Image (cartoon, rainbow, N blue to C red):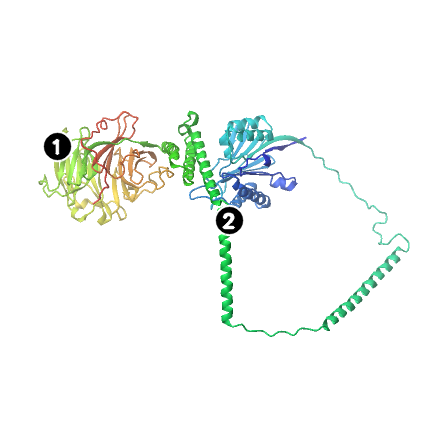
Amino acid sequence: MAVRLHMNLGVLAESQRLPDSADTVVVVEPNIGSTSRTKGSLYLLVTGAGGRKLREATKLVAERIRDDYYYDLSAGIAVCLRKAILAANKVLFHSPDRPLVGAGESGPIGLAVAVVRGNELYVATLGPAEAYLVRQARLLTLPDSSPDSGMPAEDVDGPEVWHGEITAGDCLILMSPNVSRTIGLGPIQDAVMQLHPQAAVEQIHRQFGSGSLGSTGGDGVVFIEASEVASTHKAAPLKPVWPGESMAGAPERSPIPLADAVVGGVAAMQTSARQAQLVADGWLRRGVYGFFDRMPQRPMSRGRVTPMTVRRERQQRAAVAIIGLLAVIAIVGTSMWFLSGTGRSDNIDRQQKAQQAYTKAQSDLFAVNGNNRDLVSSEPATAAGYLEDAYSQLQIAEQNGYDPSQLAAPRAQVVAGLNRYYHVTVVQPQVVLSFLTDDLEGLVLGPDGAAYLIDNTVSTVYRVNLQTGAKVPVLTLNQPPPIGGGVVGSPRLLATGGQDVLILDSFNSLWRWHPAQGNASGRGSLIKVNIADNVNWGVGARAMGTFIVNADQNQYNFYIVVPSQHQVLKYPPSPDGSGYPQLGRINYLSVAQDVSTVDDMYVDGKVYLVDKGQITQYELGEVVKTWKPGSPGDQLLRPNGPVYTRLTADNSAQDQGTFYAYDGLNRRIVAFKKVDGSIVGQYMVPATTPWFSALTGMFVIPGTAGSSPTLYWTEGGNLMSALLNPSAAPSASASAGVSLAPLASPSPSKKP
């Protein structure tokens, strides 16, 4: 005895559906052998989040998928399903019944479809719809749902069709996500395992529509349970067939005597009668036509020519009459529209949409944080999906007139959760030293552990002790000629090289400040560095950097970005360390390019240029196309993306440590690994503070023994600091952040 699968179906009756449900269910179980063998049985649920008014749209999608799937015989089941879904989306997109979708919103209509052929199972979902398979008391998702790809949409990427086997005892669930969010998957799984599919559907619907839950909206549920039934088939043996009459095959003659003669006579009489009928009809027609010919006829009237002026007057009067009629119709129609309360109905629809969006956002937040859960820590990807949906729902609620004050608290929870998922740390800024309203820039960490910065207001380079906040001038405009002679111009750029701090002034003169060994008071020597061809640099050098080649002799290569020569110039040091000869100069970039917009440069054996908001890595003068900073991934909160202007690192060794890049557009510091550009984290200040708006220089001191790294930066007239990991123990260099002067507000930086 053979065994085959039989499908026990559980579907909610149409009379039991909720009044505001837009869901449509289609079940096709063909009894034609060829159709059943090739196309199988179709189970389809089309759900919509928008109330009863979407019922026509879901019905249109369901009928189109059913018709196209069974009509299309060009390919297999998976391809035909995908083609039918794409065709339904196109018909809905151009239909007058389609729901309105705002910019950036996903369509409100989703579908879950399953095809069973023998023991084969095909399942596909699109938009806000869910499909599950219960097998051996385990609940499996088939396939992964994608709620952000609903219909209608201009371009729908064909849904993924899952293909597998269905065995006796398995139960397939097609369900609206509104039901699963309200009741939970646990009660649904218990009902499926304990009850017949139809009884399970009715029990789930009673729980969903009960007064305690107060549920509204989509209530579509389809349960399909596979069971075994006996199948027998017995073929009937073929039997020979003999003629039923002994006279079969003989000439066609009647066995009754004279019957053939009588039949022939009757046929002759019928022919004669037809001829007589035709003759009588001809006589009658000729008589009638002759009578009409003898009747008197009216003479044909002559045509008249109407003057052009008369015709124009008639046309004008007709046009005025038509315009007046249209005006009356418009006035009557407008009055009826206002009296019918259509405007109030639209307002009610907007309020209902806003309330539904707010309720959905609260449900998403409960899924993340309800019942003392922390889904961001345990299941980050799932939590991100709920939080992103909640963010979109709150936007929909606000667009439809929901009170912004009531949205503030849930929006803050959503933003905080998303920031945790995107590894955002909020740091607390502290003022190390305030220069009041002076304009500061060009901050570097000196070899003696002090900060060096340029005060453009007084054209002075200061050394600042990070522990005490004491400042000492190192170089000032027009100061007496130091060792090496020459006139000191206004300082423009700073860099650190070995045991020196390099200063470039407005005359393109390069000065070397060498701090005194073992002295913490800020004493040192200022020496002019000999670069013979610095007069050819022109004005407006954008950035400079160094790379150690001999640490024992304190020798380093010197790099400078020169827009007038479309190059990054590289100068190896002279053997005696006295300067940088012209003969050794080389063009670092293999191809000349526009560097007039470069904002910063970092050198660690490789060269990194910050240009037009992007960071590019160069090795041996060539662009490394396989390296770039990763995306923070938070386009939902910060859709404009990062625009970098400053770059520093916590380790000077090549491909080691972490980069810190300043994104002024989004007021944050983005940290990523030097070796591959992968994101490490983000650092932002509290939204109520003005910092990170116009950062002009920065460096990072790494923590030791588990302590937090410390960021130092200049902004406006202040030297600032912040612990990048507030939960760690503060480092020695960051513990002092003392404010020695009143706090000054930041001001935009000025690049000469």
- Residue 621, by quadrant, is top left
Tag 1's secondary structure?
loop
From the top left corner, tell me how far across and down residue 243 is, in percent. Answer: 82, 46
Query: Considering only order in the chain, which callout, 1 or 2, is on the residue closer to the N terminus?
Result: 2
Q: Furthest residue to the right?
A: 257
Residue flagged by tag 2: what amino acid is it? Met
At which x and y percent is residue 416?
Answer: 36, 32
Q: Badge 1: few (under 14), some or many (20 or more) residues near its Cα, within 10 Å?
A: some
Position of 163 compared to 299: left or right?
Answer: left
Q: Could you tell me which secondary element the residue under label 2 belongs to? A: helix
Determine which residue is flagged by label 2.
336
Residue 168 in view: no
State the residue in front, 659 or 102.
Answer: 102
Question: Which is closer to the viewer, label 2 or label 1?
Answer: 2
Q: Position of residue 439 (x, y in %)?
A: 19, 40
Residue 261 seen in the figure:
yes
Q: Is residue 533 above or below residue 306?
A: above
Where residue 523 is drawn, which disc sits there? 1
Image-based side of 616 in relation to 108, left or right: left
Q: How many marks?
A: 2
Q: 661 above or below 187?
A: below
Q: Quadrant of residue 610?
A: top left
- Closer to the camera, 330 or 605? 330
Residue at the spot x=88%, y=58% of the render? 261
Crowding around mark 2 (Cα neighbors within 10 Å: few <14, some 14 to 19, many 20+) is few
